[in-house]
Image (cartoon, rainbow, N blue to C red):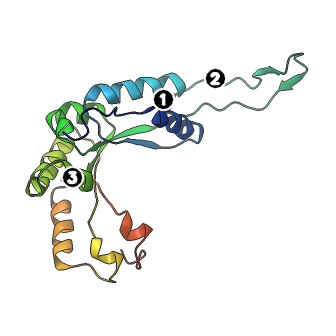
Amino acid sequence: ARNAMLPTISAKDWVDIDFAIENDADLIAVSFVKTADTIRQLKSYLQSKCIPLGSDIVVPTELGTKGSGGSDADTSEYMPHVTPGVISKIESFDSIRNLNDIVAVSDGVMVARGDLGAQVPFEEVPVIQQEITRACRQFNKPCIVASHLLRSMLQHPTPTRAEVADIADVVRQRADALMLSGESAAGLFPSRA
């Protein structure tokens, strides 16, 4: 695999994860997940920094004092951050080999077809997508299908028939969401996409 030696969560990612926590992100997506252990490690970290959704935790209204002399008491209310969910992006041979384990520990899964197509032969992507959506249904986890769904709409106001058929197939597979990126971020017709 082309990414076998790269860490799944880099040092910069940990900084970004802390930023996400501080800004109350609902979800954190992890790219190139190779094993379920990566997700377990991230969830352990999140649990150490956050509270579970729906927890009844007494929050202190005074955090103590600021400065060296203790003269400036901080009486602002401290609100702990709720643990964000973790979305595993499936986009490599390693993640496919460990698919069921990864899906089982994730809060949701994204089929990242663009990167997946760079890792596996193109003709295998639709079959792998179906395997991933099936695994998500089996474990009752949300499944997001992303990349190149309405690619022609970067330049044109209507999708191609092939794109419509592709989206219909994703819906038949019971994916929970379709994610547009370039179509709505850089396309000429973002609201129509």
Determine the CA span between mark 2 and mark 3: 49 Å
Question: Which one is earlier in the sequence, the residue at label 3 or at label 1?
Answer: 1
Q: Residue placed at 47% from the left, 28% from the top?
A: 46
Q: Which of 109 and 9 is in front in this view?
A: 9
Q: Which amino acid does label 1 sit on?
A: Pro
Q: Is mark 1 on a helix, strand or loop?
A: loop
Question: Which one is earlier in the sequence, the residue at label 2 or at label 3?
Answer: 2
Q: Which quadrant of the rendered structure holds the N terminus?
A: top left
Residue named by callout 1: 52
Disc 2 vs disc 3: which is toward the camera?
3
For residue 118, the mark is: 3
Q: In this view, does 126 lie above or below 69?
A: below
Q: Do the residues labelled 2 and 1 touch (CB within 8 Å)?
A: no
How far from the left and from the top, in percent, is residue 121? 11, 53
Q: Which amino acid does label 3 sit on?
A: Ala
Toward which corner of the image does residue 22 lie, by quadrant? top right
Q: Residue placed at 21% from the left, 37% from the top?
A: 95
